[in-house]
Image (cartoon, rainbow, N blue to C red):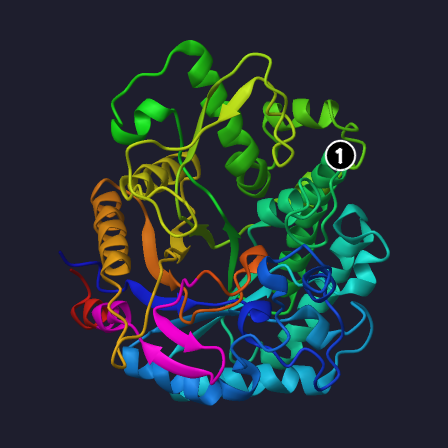
Amino acid sequence: MKFPESFVWGAATASYQIEGAAKEDGRGQSIWDVFSHTPGSVANGDTGDVACDHYHRHTGDVALMRELGLAAYRFSVAWPRVQPDGTGPANPRGLAFYDRLVDELLAAGITPYATLYHWDLPQALEDRGGWTARDTAHRLADYAEAVHARLGDRVRHWTTLNEPWVAAYLGYGNGVHAPGRRDPAAAMRAAHHLLLGHGLAAARLRELGARHLMLVVNSAPVLTPAQVGDPSAAPGEADAAAVERVHALLTRQFLDPVVHGRYPEAVLEAAGRNGGAGHVQDGDLELIAAPIDQIGVNYYNPCVVEAAPGEPADAAWPGSEDIGFRAAADVPSTAMGWPIVPDGLSRLLVRLTRDYPGVPLMITENGAAFEDVVVDGRVHDADRVSFLEGHLREAHRAIEAGADLRGYLVWSLLDNFEWAEGYRRRFGIVHVDYATQARTPKDSALWFRDVIARNGL
């Protein structure tokens, strides 16, 4: 089962989850520094203060990437490392770290994919309103310019935002992520301002000569309970309407404005019930629709819903009145409790290609947490190998069905700080002993190395 000759294989991480060095070289506080130090916010009181200590161990980590045969590495830049207060001159010591990282990647033959925003907003900007404030979108563009000025001569692949749905609705809607606010109207404003920031940053990067821009979304197929196990199951009219409304809130809310220059009606209706859409100003959609070269797709599991008259809107889903979010029955799940539905990936990729023709796709995150144990210096994570193989087979099936898929980046290279779950959930293909910082490639890493070497399964 061969993939296209130009198919890109790699792995992904995020700054706050792996870097550590939270107070070194002039780095400012991020919303995740404050949130993780707030009692009750993160499992076991864990923080990203040290994480995987990648800031000091990146040379060894890049060597490990080379040993695994990675062709691409997607990392994120920590905004408070570059601009400690979110504005003003760039911090040269913070940028120097990414300078070294990019040089080491290129020396190892690994293409760097830089993500500008993976949720670690400078706390100083949050104190001025965060993503609910329009000004933050303009500050993102300034920050993008500062990073490009230092790395743009070597970095060719740029992502503006990672998963704006999560940043807006888990950060400002139900508060389970930083900054921990619980206000549906604020979440909808944040979602729009994130998109505005994407558009402004993309335009700025284009002006500076960037040639490959991407937006990364946490898209998923929205299915009824019956469709999880039977793709041919035809939902009733009410369930079908629920599916399409949630798809609009999850995926179309972000990709329709970027690719088509408009919001879905379901999103405008949801805004009307949650503070209105006055934050959408004339000209915003034209800015947001700055052309992108690729859509990044982070897929873990489907979203399962059905019509549920009288059920109130979920706090993370403004506009989801009369819809029930359900668990997927009769399928295995990961340590996160997420259902394992590999063919959800092929269904999703085919639909995205249909809905957004002409914009290639890349799987920028796909992986799973399991209960990994080191035994005699090895981690036999057969469940993860099975998960990855199943999803790669579906990625191949999607390509055969016409999906314009250009690459696959596994999540994650390393076990790391898993946001509100702290360190109790392990997604890495490389095990990290947090007490010693020892790295141990799991069986899944060795398996993935072989997949890359043969360009297929």
Spot occupied by residue 240 in the image (x, y as percentages of width and height): 42, 17
> 153 or 64, which lies in front?
64
Q: Which residues are magenta?
A: 426-449
Judge left or right: residue 39 versus residue 326: right
Q: Tell me which residue sits at (44%, 39%) in the image.
A: 356
Q: Is residue 455 above or below residue 152?
A: above
Query: Toward which corner of the image does residue 286 lie, by quadrant?
Result: top right
Q: Is residue 148 visible?
A: yes
Q: Secondary structure at mark 1?
A: helix
Judge left or right: residue 79 versus residue 101: right
Q: Is residue 19 above or below residue 226?
A: below
> 113 or 337, which lies in front?
337
Is 451 magenta? The answer is: no
Is 434 magenta? The answer is: yes
> 250 or 374, which lies in front?
374
Q: Tell me which residue sits at (39%, 57%) in the image.
A: 369
Judge left or right: residue 441 versus residue 95: left
> 234 or 150, which lies in front?
234
Number of labelled discs? Answer: 1
Query: Toward which corner of the image does residue 441 lie, by quadrant?
Result: bottom left
Disc 1 crowd, CA 10 A, few/some/many (<14, 14-19, 20+): many
Spot occupied by residue 409 in the image (x, y as percentages of width and height): 37, 62
Spot occupied by residue 191 in the image (x, y as percentages of width and height): 67, 43
Dot 1 amino acid type: Ala
Q: Is residue 316 above or below residue 107?
A: above
Q: Is residue 280 visible?
A: no
Spot occupied by residue 56 in the image (x, y as percentages of width and height): 55, 88
Residue annotated with mark 1: 185
Query: Which quadrant of the figure contains the N terminus?
Result: bottom left
Query: Which quadrant of the figure contains the C terminus?
Result: bottom left
Residue furthest to the right: 128
